[in-house]
Each structure stands twice: as C-alpha cells, then as structure tokens.
Amino acid sequence: MTATAPPSGPSPSALRRPLTAAGLLTALFGAVFGLLLAVAAPASAHAALTGSDPQDGAVVATAPQQVTLTFSEQVALGSDSIRVLDPSGKRADTDAAPRDLHSGATVKYGVALRGGLPDGTYTVAWQAVSADSHPVSGAFTFSIGAPSETTVALPGNEAGGGLVGTLYDIARYAAYAGFIVLAGGAAFVLACWQRGGGARPLQRLVVRGWMTLTAATIAMLLLRSSYTGSGKLGDVLDLDGLKAVLDTKPGAALVSRLLLLGASALFVAVLFGTYAKREDPREKKDLTFGLAIGGAVIAAGIAGTWALAEHASTGVQPGIAMPVDVLHLLAVAAWLGGLAALLTALYRTPDLPSEAVRRFSAIAFVSVVVLVATGIYQSWRQVGTWSALTGTGYGQLLLVKVGLVAVLVGIASMSRRWTGRLAAGSDASAEVTAEADEETEADEETEAGAETAENPERAAQLARQRAAVATAEKKRIRDADPGRSGLRRSVLAEVGVAVALLAVTTILTSTEPGRTEEEAARSSVAAAPAQSGPVNLSLPFDTGGENGKGTVRMDIDPGHTGANVIHLWIEDPGKKAMDVPEVKLAFTLKSKDIGPLPAVPVRLTEGHWTATGLQIPIAGDWDVAVTVRTSDIDQTTVTKNWKIG
C-alpha cells in the first residue's frame, strides 16, 4: 500500500487516486533516471584489473625482474595474493608479499621474480578484496622468449564462489530480511498500532527478525575469511583468519552490527514489555517518543553497517552515497517490514483497527517516494550509461528490480481500495461485535452468579471458556468482512513480490556494477590479446619492370600474440603462380614504437613462400610491409595496416 485511505467508503474519485499516484511515481522515476544516465561521469565499485606488465599474452625477449598489476581502485592484498607460476607449475616469484607501487592515483602492486628463469609461458594468478568488500580474482599468461606448453590450469572459479560463497550469500539475504522485519515490524507497532505491542503474533515476528539478523551476522563474520581467501569450509573456525577479518572494514562493520543488535534487544524488550503494558496516556506518549528516537538511531546505525562496507563506501561521492544508502534501507524496511507486520496482524489478530491500516498506508507512500528518489541516485552511481543498463548483468538485474517495484506499487494501489472498503465496513462490524459482547456479558453475569455460589473454580473455568468463544466469534465476524478478506489477499500478494524483490536486491549487492564492468572491458581490449583468428591479407604490387605486376596473398596463423606462421602466395594478374627472386617481410607497431620486426620467407614451390617463428609481442594495429623483387633492379614495397592479436 502506498497511499492514505479515506475515512469512509471509496468514491469514484478516490479510486482513481492510487493509479494517479502510481503513475506519477513511474513518470518521476523514468524522467530523473534518464536525466542522471545522460550526465553520468566515470566511477568504479568492484575493483578491476586495468593493466599489467608484462601484458596478458605478451612475449618478452628476456625475463622481467618483476610482474606488476594495476587496479581501478584500492584493493586489499594478502601475502600470497599474487602468484607467478612457471610452465611446470612451480613458483617463479620470490614468495614475498606484494609491494605497493602506488603513484598518484594509480593503484599498482608488484611481485619480484626469481633470477635465471627459463623460456616458456608463465601464469600470473591474483586474488584481492575490493574497497566495497567483495573478493575479485583473475589470471593471465605471458611468455619469455617464446610461448610453450604449460601444466598450469587457470582457475575456473571466481573468488567468493563455491559452497562458502553460497553460504555467505544465504547469510547476506537472511541479514537483509531480518533487518527489514525487525525495523519495519517495530515501526508498525509504534507508528500504526500501539496496542499491537501486546499481540503475540507481532511480538514473535519482530523477535524472529532480530534472531535472524543476529545469526546471519555471526555466520558472515565466521565465513568472511574463507569467503575472501581459500574458499574452504574447514577454514571457517580458523582463529587467525577471524583475527585478520576483524582488522578489515567489513569485519569492523559486522562487529558494530552485533553491538547495535545488543542495543536493539533492549529496545525490543521495552517495546513488548513495559510499553505494551502501559495504560496511562501521558506516560505512553512520552515512552512512544523515546522509543521512536532510540529505535530510529539504532535502525540507522544498523543500516549504516551496510553502507560502511559495501558499494556506497566507494566510487563517486561516497560522502553523499552512504547517507543515501542508509535512507534507502530504512525506507525499504518501513515499507516491506511494515507489510510483513500488517499481513501477520490481518491473519493472526482479530482486532486490527482500520485506523492502523490507514496509518501504514500513509507511511508506505512516503517510503516509496524515498525509495524511488534514493534508488535513482544509486542506479546512476552504479550504472551510469544506457549501454551499461542493458548490456551488463548488473544493469539487467536493476531493470528486473525496477519492474518488481512497479508491480509492487500497482498491487499497493489495489490494497488502498480494500483499505477504503475496510474502513467503510468497520462501523457495521463494530456494531455487530458490540451487540455480541453485550449479549455475552449479560449471559456471563447470569451464569456466573449461579456458578459462583456453587463452585468458584468452575465459574473461573467457564469464564475462560466464554472468553475464548467470544474471541473466536469476534474473529469470525471480522473474517467475514469482505474488505478485510480482500485486503488480506492484496497484502499477501505484496509480500510475495517483496520476497522476490529482496532476492534480486541481495544479488545486486554482490554483482559487479555496470560502470566497473564496462571499464574492465575497455581495459581488457587494450591490454589483452583479441583472439581474432588467422589474418588473411591481399596486397597488389607493381615493381615497374617487365612482368612486374601481381598480388601477394598472405596468411598469418594463428593471428594473435606469440609465435605465428606466415604463408605467401604470389600471383600474376591472371591468378597464376608467379616466381620471383626475393620476398621480404617487416612488421611495425607505431603506437608502441615497436619494430620493424623482420621475417625472412623461404621459397617452398613456385609462387609459394613461408616464414616461421614470427613473434608478435603485443596486440595492436600492425603495419605489414612486403618487399617483392621481380628482377635485379626492379622491386617495390607495399604496406597494409591490420589488427593482429
């Protein structure tokens, strides 16, 4: 529900208002979201490898003294985070901790290599924790002298995967769900239905939310070391690993959350103890104010533990993003947690007043407005461009989330209709209930007088039975109200969509943002070899002498960095094999000031030449120069630019 219900039955104009509100929210979301994407600026969240020396796939003539990695943002590295393995799988680095080679805004780390390394293909495997607490990893190869076969298998699983990753993701989902139920349920009691503090179903709901959040936080704290490191479940109880986690920003956030949960336990005890039993209106009002302030501070503090350690704490404008993230989480809790409390009250308590439903409807509307505004800002930070919105996993998940929010708002507008009908029928229901209560009280007074004179214990037992029957009758009368039944079904549908929305949100928190994914893709285009396959060129030539015209057809296989084999076919204008005394080749990469690299073809048969062992060190747009000599004095050089690697 997202709007305030009228105090009487819904008029035609009232029934049109929910749709108007939903339409306005949708239009606002689309307009502002498009504007923010149009003026987006570069940013990062998950760290990405933006460069290395040597580059991925490069062939170097001599062994380098070290291997360096450059990242898009600050990362946390352990002593074994960067490993260099030779073709047989043995360590080629010195086993020392990575060295910090930062220069200005450039985030760079390096490891020293052992001396006397033989030629062959070397594998660099790395793993780190980005500034938003998520583990990242990768691997690449380079060759010394010439590529060779290697026994090293590149890791197939990304950091944070496997069983430990699954358990950590489950704990993360449970933590979000627990916080939403805890904060939203408590807010529902304080702001919408204060008498609900004495209702056992609501008490159990909020307490279970607290228990879920506490258990999930402890689980994440224990799993954290293995999640960002070995990935082995057996390392969960490693005290050294736990100590290392406590020294990190995510570990500090989890510990802070546990401390705040201790304070929230006291809050819950007062809410469902002293507060629920307080009858004096003035004392209740003062206690409500105190609990509202204290509860808001605790809820904001718990929400801040997510903002402190995850996406909001890094990238552009972290000083703005963190409080916006806190507001976003509080709005989600007030809306979805309040929905869970409302659904529980509708199904488990017989005396939920329509006034409580109307109050929640107003709170839900404000929550949705805040949710849309903060969600737009977060989307701009993490996506940034239309291409990232539609072309990355994060952007596609975000579109699913937006769709679920739209569905939720649509169902909420239907709930508002039922709220109006519930309010319209509440007076009639109250009259029926009052009459039943009067009749029950009269019967009880008559029967109790007779029973008390004979058997006081029997009278007390009958009184309890009558009270149970009266409660059941009251519940039956309220359940028969079509407004209440319709509202139940509508709120149940809202909660179902909310569960799916929470699942998508949880996945988003562990997904690489669209901005970073695009940045990493752009960096990999520049740094990694493009597997374009064999290169086929055709170069016409004319030496100017007799029979000096023809065409050189060239195949470069496999057509990427490393060793390549070249085949040349020289043909006359009639496409027949043409014999020439000499052919030379040279390759130049002007952008990197490399070359010319010569290649001397060997004649195989008439018109067919071949060259082996050509080493293309890095990918790029190479100038391929072919020199053809058709006589002692007639020769020419033709050049063509082609992307190799």
Image (cartoon, rainbow, N blue to C red):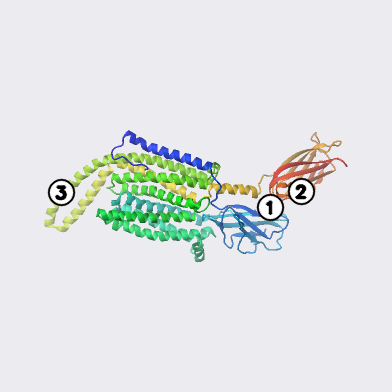
Tell me which amino acid carries mark 1.
Answer: Ala
Quickly name the residue at label 1. 58
User: Of all residues shown, which one is farthest toward the right?
Assistant: 632
**Amino acid under label 3?**
Asp
Q: CA distance from mark 1 to mark 3?
A: 95 Å
Q: Are marks 1 and 3 in contact (CB under 8 Å)?
A: no
Amino acid identity at mark 2: Pro
Work out whether mark 1 precedes mark 3 in sequence or the reverse, and give the earlier one: 1
Location of residue 93 by image quarter: bottom right
Residue 175 visible to the viewer: yes
Identify the mark at residue 551; answer none if there is no mark: none
Q: Residue 171: tell me if it is visible.
A: no
In the visual, does 3 lie left or right of 94? left
Q: Position of residue 199 (x, y in %)?
A: 29, 52
Residue at 35 percent across and 51 percent down: it is: 187
For numbered disc 1, what is the local secondary structure? loop
Residue at the disc numbered 3: 443
Q: Quadrant of the N terminus?
A: top left
Up/down of 577 relative to 298, above or below: above
The secondary element bearing badge 3 is classed as helix
Q: In the rendered image, which residue does mark 2 sit on?
A: 596
| Neighbour tally class for label 3: few under 14, some 14-19, many 20 plus, Cα within 10 Å | few
Q: Local crowd at mark 1 within 10 Å, few (<14), some, or many (≥20)?
A: many
Give the number of the mark in front: 1 or 3: 1
